[in-house]
Amino acid sequence: MNRNKRKMALIVPMMMFCAACSEVDPAPDDPVSGSPEKTTCPTDGARPLAKEGSSAEISSLNLDVVIRDFQQNHSDFENFSEETVEHLDDIYSYESTTGAAMKAFGFDEEWYSAAAYHSSCGNMYSFEKNGTGIQIGVDGLPMRKNPVLPEYLQQVSAGPVLEYGECFQVVNVQSGIKFLRGYKNALGNVNGDKCSDEKNNWANPVVYTPGMVNPHLLFNNMGDDGSVDMYDVVIQKLNERCDNKNFDQWFVDDPTVNKRVNMVLELPKSTDESNDFVYNFNSNNGGFFPLDSVNPVNHEWVSAKSCIEFIQPTGSCEVFEPQSLSIFCPPYDYQYARTQEDLSGQNTYKLCADWLNAGGPRAVNSNGTGHSAALQAAIANGKLGLQHLRNYGFTMMGYMSFQYKASNQLPEPEELKFVSSGDLWVFVDGVLVIDLGGTHMPAPGSVKIQTLAQNNHGCHIGEPLAQHSNCEGASDVTGWADGSLHHLHFFVANRQTEISDFSMSLPSSFAVDPGEIAGSGESDKKGADDENCVN
């Protein structure tokens, strides 16, 4: 059976690493308007740091992020680009069993006329038919050069193509999960979950869309004194590609289309020998849904995730209601609809049919009355519906600094590692290092810090931060100066339902001591005043 997968963005005021605290999400009585969860964490998101000489160890990094919530009827969301390659007319003319016409809920003339946009997304079908996109190999590298990246990052895989899907093995049903998802044939160095054998219930090639964004960030606030506001940054569209018509709305505050939420992501220290800090949410552990509070026992949606009100731009927590279901339910006569099961082995046919009958993936609560089709279907299907009710449509952008130390590159170089089912772009010192644009199945991307240092990344003439403190002491001959501080920005967009996977692994060099920042003389850094937490 062929099933198709999909997608995820952020801004960051400050990163801190501290000892962990607990968070509790009790389930309210009302699944729609229940009270938000309580937390035992300090209200400013900080965790107490072990004092010098103490036996306690730093257990996690805290990363403040900005998430922007979108409705699913936005023109760049829920386009089913993979399905339109073969089913464009089927979707456009589809009516549900109760006569609900998908034309009335967003899959209309405007959507139909944008067929060229939809077909410009790299996926299994568009690649087979038109050669659109770039396949990723089993070693995690693209199988064709990506000219948007610097030449020293244009490594190419010899293949074969990486495949992602549903693993064949059956998991302990008592845990609530019957099937796992992962890479069918990934090599050991590839980040992300892997199936234990090469037998899968289904597996599709991983294809992404390169060249959607400009390889250089634009920094709006660069002072004459050499200062840079690392948070006032713009990621710019390079090509009209893969439903990015209104890309300029994705990562900026625009109350006409999105709602902003400031949040904290916690990256616990890895339990393996790497000592990396890892944030990892995927299909096998509930998925990446930072705007949702979910009961960890029965996996049911509880409420919108609570937030710290006083750090919000409006002083209150504002998000759209959940407007999606975490099942593959395309708006046409899908051949496997009656037999399709979720990862717990539950048949999802009625849930999908109820969703389409209520208007489908783009039927949202845009006028503030009634509820989205997803929420209506979820309530009608009780436990099963609430297990799949989620807020999918959002973007996220983040910033953090790190220190390059030559000694940390032995015996193995430090590495930035990401996996995302949505658009993902990663920049170091304002220059693109990972380009995984488009709505696709979970795709891995990584870059070695040593490679960046040796190639003087970001410090060449014409690059955005070449004249700033990150490049002091650097040269094309010697590379980055040992001990220099550098800047990581990453952007994610979650634009298509069913799969929402996101993970990042950051090395220990991201735990930068505030004394090192203060002593560096950098005016383009935001230091930490709290002695208990490190920026």
Image (spheres, rainbow, N blue to C red):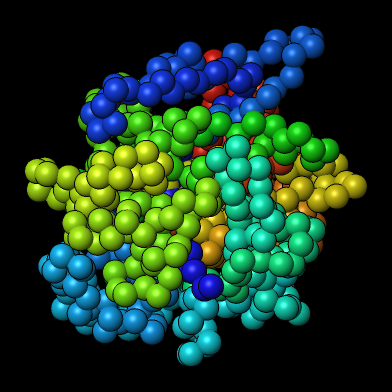
| Nearer to me, 125 or 136 | 125
Residue 350 place in picture, x, y as percent: 32, 56
Q: Nearer the viewer, residue 515 or 371?
A: 371
- Is 398 left or right of 482, judged from the image as shown? left
Q: Is residue 460 visible?
A: no
At 44% from the left and 65% from the top, the residue drawn is: 339
Outermost residue toward the right in this view: 411
Q: In the visual, does 112 lie left or right of 528?
A: left
Eyeballing the image, is 367 above or below 148? above
Q: Quadrant of residue 66?
A: top left
The quarter of the displayed image where residue 514 is located: top right
- Near-viewer residue (57 or 224): 57
Image quadrant for the C terminus?
Answer: top right
Q: Residue at x 88, y 46 (%)?
A: 410
Q: Residue furthest bottom?
A: 130
Locate residue 142, reporting x and y percent.
Answer: 65, 73
Q: Residue at x 39, y 56 (%)?
A: 348
* Residue at image location 25% in from the left, 33% down from the top: 32
Residue 21 visible in the snapshot: yes
| Corner quadrant of residue 457 | bottom right
Q: How many callouts does the rendering have?
A: 0
Q: Position of residue 373 (x, y in %)?
A: 22, 52
Quick check: 297 left or right of 452? left
* Vertical relation: 48 (above or below) 271: above
Using the image, determine if residue 243 lies above or below residue 287. Answer: below
Left or right, 153 with reference to 5: right
Above or below, 176 against 165 in this view is above
| x, y percent for residue 109 | 16, 78
